[in-house]
Amino acid sequence: MDIIKMARELGAAIQQDERYLNFKKAREANEADKPLNDLIGELNLIQMNYQQEAQKEAPSEEKMQDYDQQFRAIYAQVMQNPNMINYEVARKEVDAMMNYLMQILTLCVNGEDPATCEPKEEHNCGGNCSACSGC
């Protein structure tokens, strides 16, 4: 069987998965949320102003701090929006699914049995294994 065809079939299966469907619905809700999009527009404008100030020969630290404070305040509002909260949860679920699938493919490329290979459980320890024995 053609590997590209199989990849497309996997893509179609992913698009039928509940995690993907939840993500798609959450993304559409974000896109339809005018107040949220207005806040995101404000964030983009503040970021652009910050970058313009930073590129000046003698940037104003006061202006840059003000832009930073404005950005943080609006970012907090964006991240407290119920649609954005749902989106972030759904995005993390899709990211976890895709990471798991990529790990399986990587194991297969490294010669593991596709029928039985199992990715190791991830640890969110920051890479320092002295605190646990799970690495």
Image: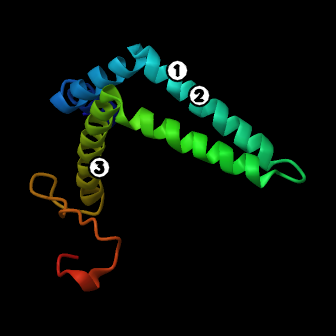
x and y, in percent, of residue 84 in the image:
35, 31
Quadrant of the frame with the C terminus: bottom left
- Asked which secondary structure carries label 1, the reply is helix
Disc on res. 38: 1
Q: Residue furthest left?
A: 116
Q: Residue at x 26, y 38 (%)?
A: 89
Instruction: Using a 10 Å C-alpha cutoff, classify the residue at mark 1 as few (fewer than 14 neighbours), some (14 to 19) or many (20 or more).
Output: few
Q: Which residue is mark 2?
A: 42
Amino acid bearing label 3: Asn
Q: Residue at x 62, y 47 (%)?
A: 68
Q: Residue furthest right?
A: 57
- Asked which secondary structure carries label 2, the reply is helix
Q: Which residue is mark 3?
A: 99
Disc on res. 110: none
x and y, in percent, of residue 77 in the image:
43, 34
x and y, in percent, of residue 23 in the image:
28, 28
Q: Are marks 2 and 3 in contact (CB under 8 Å)?
A: no
Relative depth, front residue between 99 and 74: 74
Amino acid bearing label 2: Glu
Q: Residue at x 53, y 44 (%)?
A: 72
